[in-house]
Image (cartoon, rainbow, N blue to C red):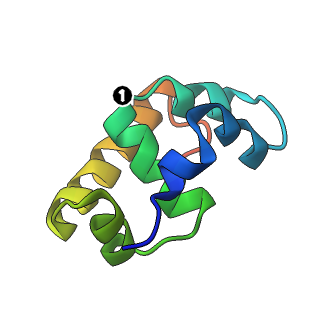
Amino acid sequence: LTENPIESSGENNIDIFWDDKSEVYFAVMDLPEKYRIVVHLFYYEDYSVRKISEILNRKESTIKTQLYRARQLLKLKLKGEYYYD
């Protein structure tokens, strides 16, 4: 594998992927790190589940579960305001 995008970008550089510091931004930033990272890679870096599993050295099923749990947490945090099935 080449360099890890999370390590190379630095945790503070995640801010460049957000146009504004909206309620969604703060909800994502409030997620536990393991969920925040997969959400960032999937939604903002546009990586596939397979690629994320390679980058993080985790099973694809683990990544899918973490994305599911992250979405559930976001749904609760945002009280369904921004959640679309």
Apparent side of residue 50 relative to residue 44 in the rendered image (left or right): left
Residue 6 position in % (x across, y down): 50, 49
Residue underneath mark 1 = 32
Asked which secondary structure carries label 1, the reply is: loop
Q: Residue at x 62, y 58 (%)?
A: 44
Q: Nearer the viewer, residue 54 or 63?
A: 54
Q: Is residue 81 visible?
A: yes
| Residue at x 28%, y 66% (from the top left corner) | 53
Q: Amino acid at mark 1?
A: Pro
Q: Is residue 85 above or below residue 76?
A: below
- Whether residue 85 is visible here, answered yes or no, is no
The location of residue 38, given as percent across then percent down, is 40, 51
Task: Examine the rendered structure and indicate whether residue 53 appears above or below residue 48.
Answer: above
Q: Position of residue 35 (x, y in %)?
A: 36, 41
Q: Residue at x 52, y 57 (%)?
A: 5
* Residue at the extreme right: 19
Q: What residue lies at 83% left-to-right and 35% top-to-bottom? A: 20
Quadrant of res 12: top right
